Image: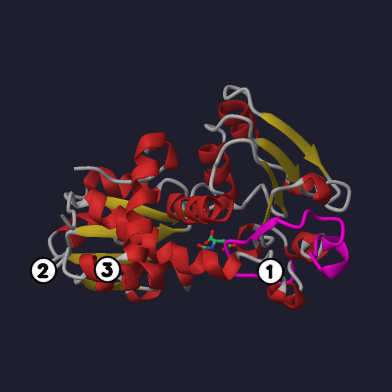
Amino acid sequence: MRSLIDIKELTVEEIEELIAVAEDIIANPKKYSEVCHGKKLATLFFEPSTRTRLSFEAAMYELGGNVLGFSEAQSSSAAKGESVSDTAKTVSCYADIIAMRHPKEGAPLVASMRASVPVINAGDGGHNHPTQTLTDLLTIHREKGRFENLTIGLCGDLKFGRTVHSLISAMARYKGVKFVLISPEELRVPEYVINEVLIPGGCDYVEVRSLEDYIGELDILYMTRVQRERFFNEQDYIRLKDTYILDGEKLKKAKSDLCIMHPLPRVNEIAVSVDDDPRACYFKQVLYGKYVRMALIMKLLELSAD
Ligand code: NCD
C-alpha cells in the first residue's frame, strides 16, 4: 500500500504515467466512470480549501466512487483534542483512501504511518503540496509539450508557498530547466530547498527581486499569493502583500507563448484583466487538477480502466 506525501516519492516515469492516464481520461471520460465503483474517498480538511477538496471529490465521483469527510477542523473530533493518528486510524475503518490537508507540516505523513489505507497529502502547512504539483505538471505538459529546457519564474511568497516547494522538487529533475526565483528578501525560498534540491540537482537558478527585469526570459511564470495565514505579524503581511501585481503593462515585455500559472486562490497578484490574455493558464490548471487526481486515486488504489 502506497501513500503520496512528497512529490519526490514518484519517479519521473510514474509522473509520466499519471500524466498519460490523465490525458486518456480527458479524451475518454466514459471509460473511467465506474473504475472506483464501491470505493470511498475521505477528505479530511483541517484548513480551508476550494479547489483541492472539491477537485478530489469531483474526481472520485467521476470515477463512480463516493466521498465522505469534513472541511474544517472545528467540525471534527480534532476540536475535542483527538490526535491526527487516531483520526487516521478511525477513518481507515470507513474509507478506502484519504486526502488530508493540515496546517501542521508533517501531519499527513504521521497520518500515513497510522492509517491502513493510502493517504494523500493535500497540503501540509508551508511545506508541500504534491497534488497541486501534479496539476501544474499536467498543465505544463499540455501547454509546452515538455518539461525539459524551460525557464520557469516563480514569483511571490516562495518562503511559505508550499506549491512552490513541491513544484521546484519536481522540475529540478528535468534537464535544462532554469529557475528564476522572484521574491522580496523576506520571502525567499527556504534554505532547505536550495541545499537539498537545487544544489544537489545541479540546477541553474537565480534569486532576484524584480519581476520586470526577468519576465522577458520566461517560458512559464508561476505567480503565488502571499500566505497571510502563515505570517507571525499582520504588519509584515500588509507591507509585503502587494509586492508583485502582474498586469498588461508588465506582460508587454513577456514572450508571446509565456504560460502564466497560479495555484489559486488569487488575491491581488494578477490583475483580473489578465484573465482574458491567451497566455493565462490558471483556470485551465483548475480543471486539469481534477483529471490528474482521478489518475492518482486509481494508481494508489491499484485500479485501472482496462
Ligand atoms: C494553494 C495551497 O493551498 O497551498 N492552493 C491550492 O491548493 N490550489 C495555494 C494557496 O493557498 O495560495
Q: Could you tell me the amino acid type at mark 3?
A: Met
In space, the residues marked 1 and 2 are separated at their CA atoms by 41 Å
Residue 20: image location, x then y, percent: 36, 50
The residue depicted at 11 percent of the width and 68 percent of the height is 38
Depth check: give the residue in front, 185 or 284: 284
Q: Which residues are magenta?
A: 244-269
Residue, disc 3: 60
Label tally: 3
Residue 220: image location, x then y, percent: 67, 51
Q: Could you tell me the amino acid type at mark 1?
A: Pro
The answer to whether residue 190 shows anywhere in this view is yes
Residue, disc 1: 278
Which mark identifies residue 38? Answer: 2
Going from N to C along the chain, the mark reached first, 3 or 2, is 2
**Which image quarter: residue 228?**
bottom right
SS at mark 3 in the image: helix
The answer to whether residue 11 shows anywhere in this view is no
In space, the residues marked 3 and 1 are separated at their CA atoms by 31 Å
